[in-house]
C-alpha cells in the first residue's frame, strides 16, 4: 500500500483530524504534505457532508443539508518543482470505500446515499418538477449496490472522485469571482441561485494562519462548480486506471480531492445524484514541464479514462429535444434537451410501478450514459439517455405483454420543500 499522507479517523469530525483539509479554493491554503514527481501515495476522503446524511428512512437530513460546509476536501498536496504552466499528471491507482469497515454510521462504511435537494436548499437538474427533498440509501456488497428505497435494481459501482483539481492563482480566483458575481447580479434573488459567491461562514482553510483567515475566507471560491482547475467535474469515468492532466497555476500545483462516489449516472442529475461515500484513493503524480503551452491546455483538464467500466451489452435509450414542457421552442438548447430525455426516461419507468422520485434517484445513481446526439439541426438539439437493461431484476424493454408491475417497496423518503 502506498504511504498514507492524509489519514482520517472515522470517529472524529473532519475539522478535528490530525491534518486539516479545506472546503474552499484559494492559492494561500497551505499544503498538508509535499511529494515529488514519481511518488505514489494514499489519501483518505470524507464524504462531502462529513456525516450529516445518515442511514435511515427519513429525508429531513437532505432537506436541511448544510450546503455551506461542502466540499470536505483532502489536501492540498504540493508537488516538488512543479511551476505554473506545467501539466500535473495524476494517475488514479486505486479507489474504494472506507478500508476495512463494512458497517458504521459514515457513508462509505458499507453504504452510501443519493439525494434530491429541495428547491430552496440546493435544487437540482429537474427542480421545477421535483421541488421536495428525497433520499435513497444504497447498500454495498463487494462492488454491487442495491437499495431498499429503489427495489428491483442492482449494479456494479464505477467508483471515482467527483472532485479533484489544482489551486487557482490569485489572478484566476479574481476572474472566477468577477464573472460569477456578474452572473448572480442578473437575477440576484433567483431560487436556486445562479451561482455561489464566496461565503466566509463555515469556511475551512486548512492550516492557514488565523490572522489571514478573515481575508482569505472572504475571497475563497466555493467548490460546487467545475472550473479551469478541474474541480467538481463529477465525471463518472475518472475511475481506477485513469490518468488526468491538470493545468498548474501556482507553485507546487496544490492538488486537492474528495467527494468520492460509489456510482453515478452521467450528469449527476439530482445534484446529490451520485452514490455519495467516504473512502480512500491511491494516486501517482508526475509533471510535464511547460505542458500547458506545449499542448494548448489553458483552461481545462484532459484525461484518459480507466479500463474498469462495467460492460453492458444492451441499453434502453430515451431522446429529448429543446422544447419546453409547455411547448416553447428553444434554439439548440442542449441543457433543455437532456432534461426532456431524463423526464421521458422517468415517465417510462413509472409504468413499471416506480414513483417518479424513485426513477429520478435511479438516473442519478446508476451508470446511465448521457449523450449530445445532435447539436446542429436547427432549432432542436437532441440529447439521449441510455439505461443499461441488465441493472433491472425484470425485463424493462417494451413488449406486447405490457410492463411488469414491480413492488416499489417503502419508496424514497420525502421531506417537503420549505
Image: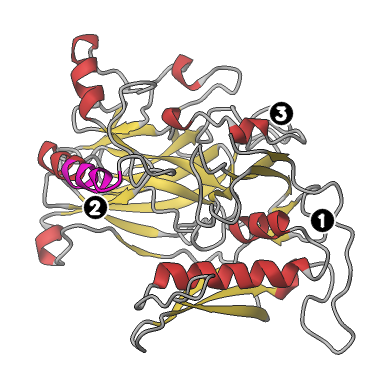
Q: Residues within 10 Å of mark 3 (few under 14, many from 20)?
A: few
C-beta proximity under 8 Å, tags 1 and 3: no
Query: Mark 1 and mark 3: span between their CA atoms?
Result: 22 Å
Residue 152: % across, % down: 82, 61
Q: Nearer the viewer, residue 399 or 254?
A: 399
Residue 257: % across, % down: 39, 40
Q: Which picture quadrant has residue 40?
A: top left
Q: Write down the residue under mark 3.
A: 104
Q: Name the main secondary structure of what is drawn in magenta.
A: helix
Report if residue 184 lies within the magenta region: yes
The numbered mark at residue 151 is 1
Q: Which tag, 1 or 3, sits closer to the chain's start?
A: 3
Q: Which picture quadrant has residue 217?
A: top left
Residue 159 shown left or right of residue 37 in the figure: right
Q: Quadrant of the C terminus?
A: top right
Query: Mark 3 and mark 2: span between their CA atoms?
Result: 37 Å
The residue range painted magenta reads: 178-187
The numbered mark at residue 228 is 2
Q: Nearer the viewer, mark 3 or mark 2?
A: 2
Amino acid at each position: 500500500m502506498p504511504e498514507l499522507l492524509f489519514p482520517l479517523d472515522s470517529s472524529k469530525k473532519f475539522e478535528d483530524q490530525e491534518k486539516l483539509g479545506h472546503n474552499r479554493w484559494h492559492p494561500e491554503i497551505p499544503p498538508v504534505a509535499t511529494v515529488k514527481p514519481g511518488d505514489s501515495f494514499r489519501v483518505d476522503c470524507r464524504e462531502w457532508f462529513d456525516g450529516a446524511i445518515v442511514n435511515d428512512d427519513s429525508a429531513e437530513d437532505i432537506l436541511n443539508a448544510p450546503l455551506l460546509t461542502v466540499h470536505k476536501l483532502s489536501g492540498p498536496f504540493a508537488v516538488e518543482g512543479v511551476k505554473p504552466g506545467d501539466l500535473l499528471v495524476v494517475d488514479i491507482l486505486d479507489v474504494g470505500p472506507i478500508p476495512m469497515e463494512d458497517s458504521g454510521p459514515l457513508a462509505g462504511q458499507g453504504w452510501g446515499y443519493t439525494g434530491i435537494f429541495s428547491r430552496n436548499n440546493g435544487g437540482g437538474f429537474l427542480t421545477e418538477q421535483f421541488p421536495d427533498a428525497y433520499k435513497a440509501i444504497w447498500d454495498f456488497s463487494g462492488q454491487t449496490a442495491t437499495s431498499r428505497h429503489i427495489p428491483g435494481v442492482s449494479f456494479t459501482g464505477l467508483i471515482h472522485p467527483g472532485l479533484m483539481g489544482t489551486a487557482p492563482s490569485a489572478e484566476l480566483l479574481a476572474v472566477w469571482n468577477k464573472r460569477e458575481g456578474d452572473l448572480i447580479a442578473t437575477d440576484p434573488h433567483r431560487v436556486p441561485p445562479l451561482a455561489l459567491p464566496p461565503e466566509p461562514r463555515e469556511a475551512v482553510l486548512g492550516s492557514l494562519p488565523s490572522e489571514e483567515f478573515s481575508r482569505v475566507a472572504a475571497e475563497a471560491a466555493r467548490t460546487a462548480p467545475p472550473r479551469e482547475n478541474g474541480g467538481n467535474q463529477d465525471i463518472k469515468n475518472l475511475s481506477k486506471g485513469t490518468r488526468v492532466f491538470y493545468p498548474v497555476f501556482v507553485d507546487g500545483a496544490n492538488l486537492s480531492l474528495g467527494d468520492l462516489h460509489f456510482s453515478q449516472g452521467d450528469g449527476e442529475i439530482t445534484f446529490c445524484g451520485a452514490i455519495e461515500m467516504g473512502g480512500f484513493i491511491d494516486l501517482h503524480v508526475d509533471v510535464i514541464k511547460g505542458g500547458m503551452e506545449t499542448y494548448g491546455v489553458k483552461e481545462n483538464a484532459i484525461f484518459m479514462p480507466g479500463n474498469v467500466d462495467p460492460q453492458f451489452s444492451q441499453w434502453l435509450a430515451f431522446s429529448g429535444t429543446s422544447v419546453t414542457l409547455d411547448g416553447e421552442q428553444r434554439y439548440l438548447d442542449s441543457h433543455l434537451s437532456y432534461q426532456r430525455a431524463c423526464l421521458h426516461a422517468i415517465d417510462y419507468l413509472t409504468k413499471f410501478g416506480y414513483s417518479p422520485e424513485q426513477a429520478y434517484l435511479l438516473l442519478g445513481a446508476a451508470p446511465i450514459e448521457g449523450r449530445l446526439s445532435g447539436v446542429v439541426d436547427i432549432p432542436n438539439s437532441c440529447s439521449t439517455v441510455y439505461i443499461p437493461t441488465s441493472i433491472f431484476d425484470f425485463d424493462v424493454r417494451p413488449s406486447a405483454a405490457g410492463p411488469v408491475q414491480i413492488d416499489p417497496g417503502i419508496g424514497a423518503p420525502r421531506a417537503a420543500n420549505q
